[in-house]
Every structure is written in structure tokens, then in C-alpha cells.
Amino acid sequence: MIPLLILGLLIQNPGAHGYELLSLMEKQHYKYIVNFTKGSFYYNLQQLEEKGLIEQTHQIRPNNGREIHTFKITPLGIEEFEKLMAKYGTKSEYVNLQFYGALLFADEFDTNKLLELIQSQIDQTEARIARLDEYLANTKELPSKIDYFRRMNENSRFHHLVNLKWFKELKAEIEDTTV
């Protein structure tokens, strides 16, 4: 998925440098879409270049005269982008929270510690909702076309609200059975 994100960003931002692309991914909350680190980002950027899907260009910064390495997508990269769009655009997967794995063994775990884990999920989910609310409040939909990224964030917010409700109900149910 990271190659698709990099290729798509280079189509939108030709001549961007690596740090600029990484900053865009972080600023636009791409972590809601795929887990990535700085290392995995730069590894994928290097792999795309080695495969000839992107190529380095060089620009001189006007303010200090330093050369920076920028990237542009190649025709082969456009073809790969199209393939990746088809590949990921047809996938539908299960919701997979790692918390579910821990919950499988909840009966074998200390109830008070389990309640702490659930509270941690509540806190993290509320924080995600707050970040999404902030993003959505500070962006406006584009008037001429569908703003897909905004729509994805609205959908993500909705899912987090459902999860938050479920975590709170689960916590209350456990608390009721331990009284």
C-alpha cells in the first residue's frame, strides 16, 4: 500500500522531495489507511526508484543554493499506479483490531487489568475522534468535485464512534458482572 501512496502523491505533487512526501502522509493522517514509519517510507521510495517507477531530479534551492533531490513518476510508474489502484480498489477486508486478539483470553486475565485495557482503548479512540474532528473542522470540501480524502476521514470518524460506543458498553457490562 505504501507504494500506491507514494506514487499517488507524486502524481499530485510532481517534483516533491522525500521529506515533503512523508510530511504530506503524516499531515493528511495516512496512518489511518496504512501503518508506516519513516524507515518503511524511505525503503519504499528507494524500491520504487530502483524499479524505475520514479526517478530523481535535482533542484537548486533559491534561498541557499543547495541542491535537493526531488522525484517524479515515470511512465512505468503510471502503469504501476494503475495496477495498484485496481488491486487495492477491489479489496474488502475484515475490521481487524489487535485488541480483539487480547479479548479472546479475557476470561483468563485479571478483571481490573482488563478494565484498564478497555479504558485505554476508549482513551485512544476518543483521541482519534478528536484529531479527525479537528481535521474536518479545518478543511472544506472542494466545490467542483468529490473530496475523497475528506469522505474517508468522515467514514473513519463514524467507525471510531461505533467502536467507542462498543468499548464503553463492554466496559459497563464487565463492571456490572463484577459488582
Image (cartoon, rainbow, N blue to C red):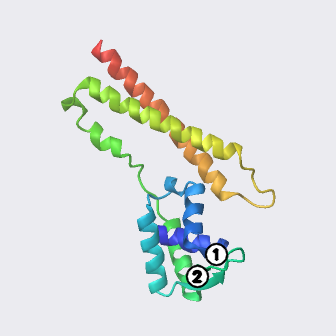
The total number of labels drawn is 2
Q: Nearer the viewer, residue 28 or 57?
A: 57
Instruction: Residue under label 1, please give it.
Output: 11
Q: Residue at x 58, y 47 (%)?
A: 155
Residue 162 in sight here: no
Q: Are marks 2 and 1 in contact (CB under 8 Å)?
A: yes
| Image position of 167 (left or right of 102) | right
Q: Mark 2 or mark 1, which has the lower sequence index? A: 1
Residue at the limit of the structure toward the left, as seen here: 108
Residue 12 rendering spot, x and y as whole percentages: 66, 71
Q: Residue at x 54, y 57 (%)?
A: 30
Residue at the limit of the structure toward the front, as seen here: 64
Residue 34 rendering spot, x and y as whole percentages: 47, 59
Give amino acid for label 2.
Ile
* Disc number for residue 102: none
Instruction: Residue under label 2, please give it.
Output: 78
* Quadrant of the rendered image containing residue 167: top left
Report, in whole angstroms, how far the alpha carbon at label 2 lies from the one at label 1.
8 Å
Residue 52 rendering spot, x and y as whole percentages: 50, 88
Give amino acid for label 1.
Ile
Query: In the picture shown, does residue 148 fall above or below 131?
Result: below
Q: Secondary structure at mark 2?
A: helix
Query: In the picture shown, does residue 39 fall above or below 97?
Result: below
Residue 68 rendering spot, x and y as whole percentages: 60, 79
